[in-house]
Amino acid sequence: MITEDPKVLAREPSLTGLGGWLVLVGLGLCLAPLRLLAVIVANATAFQPDVWGVLTTPGTDSYHPLWAPVIIGETIANLFLLGLSLVNLYLFFRKRRVFPRMAITFLAAGVVITALDLLAAQAIPMAKVAPKDVAQLGQTVVGAAVWIPYFLRSRRVRQTFVR
């Protein structure tokens, strides 16, 4: 019989600790800040004066009034996700009770931010939405669809994140 009582759950030592599927979670958490840093660095070229000027100065060929808010918003969103990924990394390895909720927040935020970024890019005629961008949204949605239920239902998660 499955029970929610933490005292009873704690009697199953095989389900405590950072093992099982949590190894994949840990690997993903270690890679997430690196991936987000790479995205932030790649997008930083938009802030170079010559690029920024072409995109945000009325009368230039590439001007669109949404460029500035989209570039700034995307940068802020990626910095937010970077911060959240670092917090999650800390919470994961410290086995903090709040980690599953924070991981769910990170996954859901990733889906929302990626979807909003694609929608904003489609509103700018000069912005090219590449198939890889749509694929990234799909990967983010699938990842959230797999891991959110895992964090909500896993007995290992309930027994591991108790501090």
Image (spheres, grey):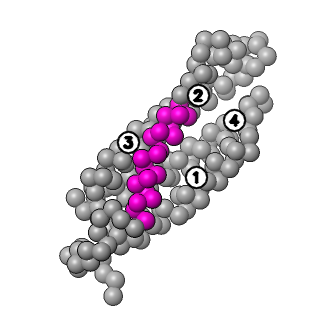
Question: What's the distance in space between the residues labelled 2 and 4, CA to CA?
Answer: 14 Å
Look at 70% across and 14% down and name the residue there: 54
Q: Give the mark toward the camera: 4 or 3.
A: 3
Please tell me whether residue 37 belongs to the stretch shown in magenta: yes
Is residue 129 in the magenta section?
no
Q: Which residue is mark 4?
A: 121
- The residue at which mark 3 appears reads as 86
First of labels 3, 2 by sequence position:
2
Is the C terminus in the top left, top right, bottom left or bottom right quadrant?
bottom left
Mark 1 sits on what residue?
A: 140
Q: For the residue marked with disc 3, what is the amino acid?
A: Leu
Q: Measure the C-alpha gap from mark 4 to mark 3.
A: 27 Å
Residue 71 in the image: above or below residue 86: above
Span colored in magenta: 21-40
Where disc 4 sits, the SS reads helix
- The 10 Å Cα crowd at callout 1, few under 14, some 14 to 19, many 20 or more, is many
Q: Are marks 4 and 3 in contact (CB under 8 Å)?
A: no
